[in-house]
Image (cartoon, rainbow, N blue to C red):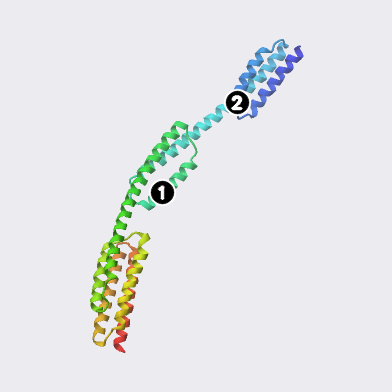
Amino acid sequence: HRAAQTARKEALAAEAEEIGANSTQWKASGDRLRAILDEWRTITGLDRKVDDALWKRYSAAREAFNRRRGSHFAELDRERVGVRQAKEALCERAEALSSSTDWGATAATFRDLLTQWKAAGRAAKDVDDALWKRFKAAQDTFFSARNAVNAEKDAEFNANADAKAELLAEAEKIDISDVDAARAAFRAIGDKWDAIGKASRDRTAELERRLRAVEKKIRDAAQSGWSDPEAQARADQFRERAEQFERQAEKAEAAGKAKDAEKARASAAQWREWADAASAAIKK
């Protein structure tokens, strides 16, 4: 009987030592060590010296496990403090950016902050949840404002497209039998067109294509009906139009509107080409 009881405690001590040295299942292993202790107390009748030696083994194993578990959770706490501090800093940056109106750059920065957030790890759950609420509130403030501005711009650009479509309807009705009158009417429409401003992107190409078609129709009529006395006046008009577009390009460039400047330069080049063609016709 004594040998069997001794063997049971030997097995329990060995199991405790394995847990103490290697286990990282902190909860399950802590529960198991308590269960071993409960069973240990039911085993009696051992030689006193043997019993004491086995108890020392169990006790040392339990202490080793508790030390490792304590270190693990202390390290976890340190990490969580680091994560909390990192996320607090990200919240502060997000809150500072939430009122920005530099939409493109700030949206990119928010994406970068979110990547950093995901890479930062987790703080204690309640802390992490509260920090995420802060971060998300700042993010939502910025993106809601951006969406409102974009919606306003879309409405404005659509209204501009409608206004340009109305001008086109006028332009397409221009009578080209009197080329000078047609050109004057088209010039007036062109000035109004430029004053309207940017139209919605999905409609711009078609509107521009139709405007160029009217322009070409008038130009073709002018070329087929040129007479020598009128040629110089036409060349001058074309040159004047080219200069107008060149001035427009310079203004756009100065305002940092590179695309508008490029478009104006292209129009200037086209009018310059017609002016040169008109001058060449006079020389002939």
The residue singled out by tag 1 in the image is: 109
Snapshot quadrant of residue 274 = bottom left
Where is residue 216? Give x, y as percent. 33, 75
Q: Residue at x 33, y 51 (%)?
A: 151
Secondary structure under the numbered disc 1 in the rendered image: helix
Q: Residue at x 47, y 45 (%)?
A: 115
Is 258 rendered above or below residue 18? below
Q: Which residue is mark 2?
A: 28
The percent coordinates of residue 86 (x first, y second) are 44, 39
On screen, 229 above or below 240? below
Quarter of image, res 278: bottom left
Q: Is the Cβ of the residue at disc 2 closer than 8 Å to that at disc 1?
A: no
Instruction: Locate residue 261 relative to residue 123 in the image: left or right.
Output: left
Instruction: Please name whichever residue, 171 or 95, is drawn nearer the observer in this view of the structure.
Output: 171
130, above or below 174, in the image = above
Identify the disc placed on residue 215. Answer: none
Q: Position of residue 50 (x, y in %)?
A: 72, 14
